[in-house]
Amino acid sequence: MKTLALLIVTAIWGWTFVLVKEGVAEIGPLWFLALRFAIATGLALPLLARGLRDWARGALLGAILFLGYFFQTWGLVYTTAQKSGLITGLSVVLVPPIAWLWGQRTSRRTWAGVALAALGLSLLVLGGREPLGPTGFGDLLTIICALAFALYLVFLDRYTKTTDFLSLFLPQLGVVALLSLAGAYIWEAPTLRLSARTWQAILITGALASTLAFFVLTWVQRRSTAAYTAIVLASEPAFAALFGWLLLGEWLRGPQILGGGLIFLGIMIPQLKPVKRPD
């Protein structure tokens, strides 16, 4: 059940990546994030009736999540989308050691899944047509982004085990919206004269890729581990490539298809039950 729920979330993010790609061609990325998460926060406001006893933890999650989005956006100014996708996705490798520092053990099967997902992600990105080029400033910014996303999963895992997940859900959306708005006001020119297509992208990503996706992610994390969640979320580039092929006609090469297969194999391995030896 948790795997299916996480795959649905990841598929939504992969599908809406196409919408985001089209949307940020007309509006600044931070303004896009601000509007997207403002809509998400508005849709989640009915949860205020339950109270916000642990709002500080939710706010911290939101701040970490914003840092991930911010450094990813900043890094894209100086690096390619392929390199950004590879480095961001490799946060799956960072989650287990960070979780270990907080005393969370990772099984051998999960480590095997992490390794396969990382290898598959590398093939998925490196198998594209564009050369990656040398490491630069944008890559360093994206490494910070990957670290932020890894920290987000580890903190989310810790907090959902001891806190009502609904108390964490609303504050993190609101903080991302506020910080994105502040960043957009400082660094980007304001504009609300957008095409219907861009407004559609903002509404869909706000409702599905933010409100629904982060609700499910926060709910599922109560019964999952940070490492396993990271493995499943590593399939986002595979879904993005799939929907890019279906909706935009983007070509998939053999190594990319193999990489997607390895990612899904990495998802399945931690779920396998150990074989009992006969007495």
Image: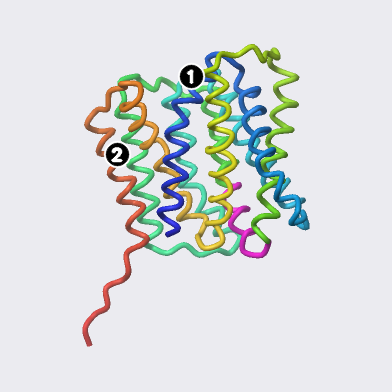
Residue 144 visible:
no
Residue at horizontal 54%, vertical 50%? 217
Which disc, if any, is residue 22? Answer: 1
Q: Residue 106: x, y in percent?
A: 47, 62
Assess disc 1: are there few (<14), some (14-19) or many (≥20) residues with their C-alpha within 10 Å of its C-alpha.
Answer: some
Find disc 2 in the rendering and name its residue: 259
Q: Are marks 2 and 1 in contact (CB under 8 Å)?
A: no
Query: Where does residue 14 sit, x and y in percent of width and height?
Result: 43, 35
- Using residue 228 as the reference point, say whether residue 151 is left or right of it: right
**Image-quadrant location for residue 274:** bottom left
Compared to residue 50, the image places residue 140 above or below, namely above
Q: Residue at x 64, y 57 (%)?
A: 165
Q: Amino acid at mark 1?
A: Glu
Q: Is residue 125 visible?
A: yes
Local secondary structure at mark 2? helix
Q: Is residue 177 magenta?
A: no
Image position of 128 (left or right of 228): left
The residue lying at 44 percent from left, 26 percent from top is 18
Q: Which residues are magenta?
A: 151-163
Placement of the C terminus among the 4 image quadrants: bottom left
In the rendered image of this protein, does residue 229 appear above or below residue 139? below
Q: Residues within 10 Å of mark 2 (few under 14, many from 20)?
A: many
Q: Earlier in the sequence, mark 2 or mark 1?
A: 1
Nearest the eye: 93 or 73: 73
Q: CA distance from mark 2 to mark 1?
A: 25 Å
Total count of labels: 2
- Where residue 185 sits, quadrant-wise, is top right
Residue 203, x across and y down, in percent: 57, 29
Residue under the image location 53 percent in, 31 percent down: 204
Q: Is residue 152 magenta?
A: yes
Q: Amino acid at mark 2?
A: Gly
